Amino acid sequence: MTLRILAVLFPAALFLSGLAAPASAVGTAALLGTWEAARTPDDERLYLTLKDKGKVEVIAEYDFTLPGMPGKRRGRSTTFGKWSVKGDAVTITYAKVHDRLRYSDKLPLAEIGLTGSAVGLKPTGTIDPQSRIRGAILWKAPHEYKLKPTEGSAASTLPAPLGAPAQ
């Protein structure tokens, strides 16, 4: 008798738990890999790599000039941290910073001046002033998205990465 009750209750419990789960939940496997912001007109890059066991690398690449030295040099800063997902909310944690991102499988590319949509991670909530991601939307890599220069200026639309030499 007890087995019959369990045989009826278990599938019902599974069904009800499925109804309680967020409709837009994303699995860990779909998030693993590299997510990159659109490149700036100056070819600055910001990307993160979500790895197994909740590990993450936040990477910024940029050009800089050393005082008294000719030409530009390419710089790179890497920050290590942890990541987690609950529903479609992704949290990146490093150096006492908590970046909150929302996963979308159809994020409009209009945000960067293109048509269509793509898989992306968009910042939500209050952005920590020490955030390396700041307000950048991250798109599943590989891609060749590039921000268009603003009128009258070819200046970068992403803030300078923390730790970057002053220009």
Image (tube, rainbow, N blue to C red):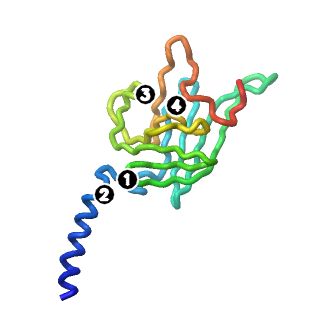
Q: Which residue is mark 4?
A: 39
Q: Which mark is residue 21?
A: 2
Q: Look at 56% across and 54% down and name the residue there.
A: 82
Q: Secondary structure at mark 4?
A: loop
Q: Earlier in the sequence, mark 2 or mark 3?
A: 2
Residue type at numbered disc 3: Ile
> In the visual, does 67 lie left or right of 12?
right
Q: Which sits earlier in the primary sequence, circle 3 or circle 4?
A: 4
Q: Is residue 102 left or right of residue 19?
A: right
The amino acid marked with disc number 1 is: Gly
Q: Viewer-nearest of labels 3 and 4?
A: 3
Check disc 1 and report its element: helix, strand or loop.
loop
Spatial CA span between label 4 and label 1: 28 Å
Residue drawn at (21%, 70%) of the image: 12
In which quadrant of the rendered view does residue 70 lie?
top right
CA distance for labels 3 and 4: 10 Å
Circle 3 residues within 10 Å: few <14, some 14–19, many ≥20: some
Label located before the other in sequence (3 or 1): 1
**Residue on which disc 1 sits:** 87
Query: Given contact means CB atoms under 8 Å apart, are the residues at marks 1 and 2 in contact?
Result: yes
Q: Amino acid at mark 4?
A: Arg
- Circle 1 crowding by C-alpha within 10 Å: few under 14, some 14–19, many from 20: some
Number of numbered discs: 4
Residue 38 image offset from top left, x and y in percent: 48, 32
For label 3, the residue is 112
